Amino acid sequence: MNSSQTREGEALIEAARALRPQIERYAAQIEEDRQLPQPLVDALAQAGLFKMLVPQSLGGSETDPETFCRVIEELSRVDGSTGWSVFVPACVGAASGSFGEDVAWEIFGREPKACIASSVTPAPNSSLRPPDRAIVVDGGYRVTGRWSFTSGCMHSTWLAGASGIYEGDKPKIDDKGQPEVRLMLFPISDCQIIDTWRVTGLRGSGSHDFAVTDVFVPHEHSLSRSTPVKPCHPGALYVFAGGKVTTSIGTAGPVIYSHWTVVGSIGFAAVCLGIARGALDALTELAAVKTLGKGKGQLRDNPIVQDQVGRAEATLQAARAYMYAMIREVWETVHKSGSSTPEQLSLLRLTATHAATLSAQVVDTAWNTAGASAIFAGNPIERRFRDIHVATQNIAIRSEYYAVAGRMFLGLDKE
């Protein structure tokens, strides 16, 4: 990165840190309302955090992946739901580099507070069969469907859902013999948000279902999920993860890496790293005031607690360092050669999975070390315990990716 990029990146990180008092002030309301309050949404948008990965020509920061992750860490350190609610729309912003100039401006650039939430998961309880059908018509598609886990939908300007493409009643087959799938973008006015997000953790992310009925989507307002999408924008960010790897992981089927899956995985991991950092912060504060009984001193005086905290710090910092080292390596390769390698993308996915997995272990350590203090609603460790165990359920950082990397290390699945 040049000095200008470094300054701009540090400014974004500092903007995220400066929001800490406001996020803390709204923490209880975020949990209660199951969404971010509008004043906080406005502050996040004003700081440019929803558009971190949008091209500068569209009013975004076009920041580097490391800065993106560090911003998400800072927000998640204070509140996991806030970090998650910024990370998802910001990650979708990376797709802006794959749209034509006019369409990218309409969706991402025209509105200063543009925020796009997306889902690739059809709602399992939908009465529609199939629930994500896009029928080919002149100029685009007529789309009917319902999708789950649409994080940030309550404050978004556009929503996106992955749809199977149909020609009449039959699925359209792509040039590789597979059913074609495209990500469809809808103005929020065309969508119905359905209140389904009543969950254990990350309550404030507002990850409800949304549905559309017979909505016309121009072809230019969609992106292929079946084949790699060539970036339209020349920035290095939009080829950061432009390669493709197809790898079998047991019965889970093929894994396709693209800019939204790889950038998404490190974003998920950044949320987890931030939650874990916040849990250790809270444990440190608790250990300084919690007593163990008459004459036994404070929690921090216990040698077992000292050992656990030392191990947790080493675990968290090592996992974080591994992920950021891989991010820097891929970023440097993209700048030098114009693309990343399949091996690098597998390793990047591995480091993200590992960071998320160890973050959960660190939060568990904080929970166990805090004792009964951590079980009460409102305790910061209690909230982070719930949040981390919802975050790590996401498919983007599932444990199967250890096997994907393992097969690569063993010389298997070479194309």
Image (cartoon, rainbow, N blue to C red):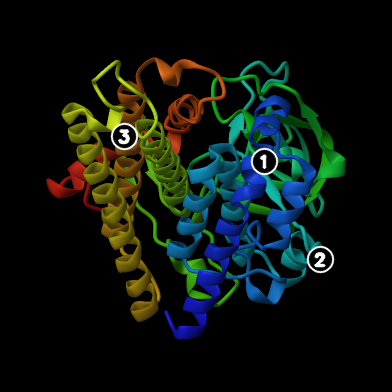
**Identity of the amino acid at label 3?**
Val
- Residue placed most toward the observer, 326 or 292: 292
Residue 110, which numbered label?
2
**Identity of the amino acid at label 2?**
Arg
Relative placement, left or right, of 203 versus 6 is right
Relative placement, left or right, of 199 versus 195 is left
Q: Which quadrant is the N terminus positioned in?
A: bottom left
**Identity of the amino acid at label 1?**
Arg
| Label 3 Cα crowd, 10 Å radius (few <14 / some 14-19 / many 20+) | many
- Residue located 25% across and 53% down the image: 415
Residue pointed to by mark 1: 25
Q: Tell me residue 157's x, y (percent).
A: 78, 49
N-terminal label among 1 and 2: 1
- Residue located 65% across and 19% down the image: 198
- Residue placed most toward the observer, 49 or 160: 49
Q: CA distance from mark 1 to mark 3?
A: 25 Å
